[in-house]
Image (cartoon, grey):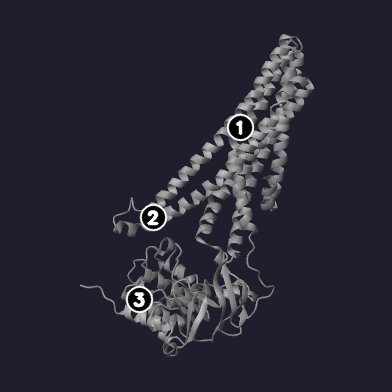
């Protein structure tokens, strides 16, 4: 555990942690020595040796005074180590998360990362701040006391020591049980946290159908699983904890019975027996405290292991020197890609000339979205080459690759800031005039005119205070401000009302003017206007050409066009 902490602490936090551990060991030894002086002190008092008692009391006072100084400095070192460790962990986790490929962030992992960077960090920094002292004391102080007891009476020391192996095995067993069950409680907690957020965000839909309370079964199941996981952990750990406490208390009972028998037999004096029983109490007490904190220590160890797994995840390789785009073209060359052993694309080859529009059409799951995300290097392909600007995407530094691309996907996410701040993310150094011009081109100015705070209006987490069409326009304004030569677009207007759709379409015209455009097409007008249409099915390009060329083939595209043309005329009956 300590080695793992040191491996991720580093710098000043690592130095403070080493001093903290060393100080805790010294502190625990001094505590044991201080209590050991009780044996001669009580012996002198009970035998009437006042001068000897004062001598031993003075010696004990000196040792405990040194102990108090060491404890204070160790405690402060622990707090400073915890603060430095927390600061370092947040920085390292943030840097690592920023380097991981976008495809790594699945829904499950996002929930785990959220829990890890909140409760997980608190668990870890609690180790030097609160857990190390009782844990180190629980092992060093009893060991020192047993060694001292051997100096006074080896028989009582051996009686106290005889239960130590059983206590150690029970402690390890209990810790392993907590460590195993904690994985379930962690997963249940992460899932419940995500479901609570989902429940809050979906209130409008739930209330519209009168199911705001009883309708969210996923949340109910997640909370029940969290409760059941907590109960299972408690039920699994309680027998081990109880057994450990009984074993430790049994050690004291053995010493008491054995010592009383020795005193009655005259082989040990009553003063020495009383003093050694006091030492035995000090031997037992920290062990009981350690049992109480052992579960918390194992939970912190699990959090530390998860952090180590995250920090050891290798980001996509970066080139020593980034490539420079030659033009605004896109291309796949014999690309094959599988995700989690599930084939997505198979031997796909195509090119998108500069300043042209290529439309991707095909059924759900055919690989359309994967193609756009491979251009943005969400993942690396299994084989083949993905080209942006005439260069392999693997030859670009991440920042240089993303500088060539503007991405507008269906799932628009706006940060909990103002409309202006969300637009300015496209190019932070842009002037206010450039931000306003991007907003005008994307028809955002029509939105801000209706709002009392204008561009300073906060959009809420995820942009929840805006409608779907308004969020799309803000995201398009962000892409316009970025002014990248290539646009990857998942045309998402099918779920918008006619007015919002018209506004978003006009915004898209401003975004795609004089740029290379790769679009996942849903609207017939977009498909018909494309310079090239790629028809995908089961991860392969089955047809390619212009609208008229593909219609003449009377194949898959013709079926697609016919189906969409019929659906276009559907109306709800009055």
Residue 223 at x, y = what percent? 43, 47
Q: Which residue has dot 1 on it?
A: 289
Question: Between 452 and 145, which is closer to the camera in this rendering?
Answer: 145
Residue 78 at x, y = what percent? 65, 42
Q: CA distance from mark 3 to mark 1?
A: 65 Å
Tell me: 229 left or right of 205: right
Say whether disc 2 or disc 3 marks the residue closer to the N-terminus.
2
Q: Quadrant of residue 564?
A: bottom left
Q: Secondary structure at mark 1?
A: helix
Residue 92 at x, y = what percent? 62, 57
Task: Specify the quadrant that holds the C terminus.
Answer: bottom left
Q: Which residue has dot 2 on it?
A: 200
Say whether disc 2 or disc 1 marks the residue closer to the N-terminus.
2
Q: Which residue has dot 3 on it?
A: 501
Tell me: 333 left or right of 490: right
Tell me: 324 left or right of 114: right
């Amino acid at each position: 555990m300590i080695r793992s902490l040191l491996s991720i602490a580093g710098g000043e936090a690592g130095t403070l942690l080493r001093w903290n551990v060393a100080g805790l060991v010294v502190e625990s030894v001094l505590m044991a020595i201080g209590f050991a002086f009780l044996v001669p002190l009580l012996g002198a008092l009970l035998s009437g040796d006042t001068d000897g008692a004062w001598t031993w009391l003075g010696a004990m006072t000196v040792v405990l005074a040194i102990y108090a100084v060491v404890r204070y400095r160790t405690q402060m070192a622990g707090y400073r180590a915890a603060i430095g460790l927390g600061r370092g962990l947040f920085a390292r986790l943030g840097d690592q998360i920023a380097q991981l490929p976008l495809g790594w962030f699945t829904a499950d992992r996002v929930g785990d990362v959220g829990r890890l960077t909140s409760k997980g960090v608190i668990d870890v920094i609690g180790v030097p701040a609160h857990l190390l002292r009782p844990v180190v004391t629980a092992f060093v102080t009893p060991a020192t006391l047993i060694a001292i007891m051997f100096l006074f009476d080896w028989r009582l020391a051996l009686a106290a020591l005889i239960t130590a192996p059983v206590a150690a095995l029970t402690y390890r067993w209990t810790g392993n049980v907590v460590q195993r069950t904690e994985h379930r409680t962690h997963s249940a907690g992460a899932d419940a946290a995500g479901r609570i957020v989902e429940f809050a965000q979906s209130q409008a839909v739930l209330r519209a159908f009168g199911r705001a309370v009883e309708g969210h079964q996923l949340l109910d199941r997640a909370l029940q699983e969290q409760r059941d996981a907590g109960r299972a952990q408690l039920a699994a750990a309680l027998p081990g904890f109880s057994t450990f406490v009984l074993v430790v208390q049994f050690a004291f009972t053995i010493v008491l019975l054995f010592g009383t028998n020795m005193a009655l037999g005259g082989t040990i004096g009553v003063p020495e027996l009383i003093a050694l029983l006091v030492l035995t109490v000090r031997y037992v007490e920290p062990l009981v405290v350690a049992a109480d904190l052992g579960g918390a220590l194992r939970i912190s160890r699990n959090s530390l292991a998860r952090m180590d797994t995250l920090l050891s995840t290798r980001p996509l390789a970066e080139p020593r020197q980034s490539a420079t785009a030659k033009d605004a073209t896109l291309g796949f060359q014999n690309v094959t890609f599988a995700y989690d052993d599930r084939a997505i694309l198979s031997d796909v080859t195509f090119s998108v000339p500069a300043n042209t529009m290529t439309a991707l059409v095909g059924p759900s799951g055919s690989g359309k979205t994967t193609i756009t995300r491979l251009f943005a290097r969400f993942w690396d392909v299994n084989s083949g080459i993905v080209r942006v600007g005439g260069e392999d995407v693997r030859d670009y530094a991440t920042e240089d690759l993303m500088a060539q691309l503007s991405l507008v996907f269906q799932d628009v996410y706006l940060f909990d800031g103002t409309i202006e701040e969300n637009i300015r993310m496209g190019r932070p150094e842009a002037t206010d005039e450039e931000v306003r011009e991007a907003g005008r081109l994307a028809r955002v100015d029509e939105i801000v005119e209706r709002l009392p705070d204008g561009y300073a209006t906060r959009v809420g987490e995820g942009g929840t205070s805006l409608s779907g069409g308004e969020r799309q326009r803000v995201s398009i304004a962000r892409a316009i401000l970025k002014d990248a030569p290539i646009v990857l677009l998942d045309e998402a207007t099918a779920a918008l009302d006619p007015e919002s759709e018209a506004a978003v379409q006009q915004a898209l015209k401003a975004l795609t003017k004089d740029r290379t455009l790769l679009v996942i097409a849903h609207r017939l007008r977009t498909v018909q206007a494309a310079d090239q249409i790629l028809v995908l099915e089961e991860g392969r390009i089955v047809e390619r050409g212009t609208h008229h060329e593909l219609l003449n083939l009377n194949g898959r595209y013709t079926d697609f066009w016919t189906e969409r043309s019929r659906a276009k005329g559907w109306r709800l009956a009055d």
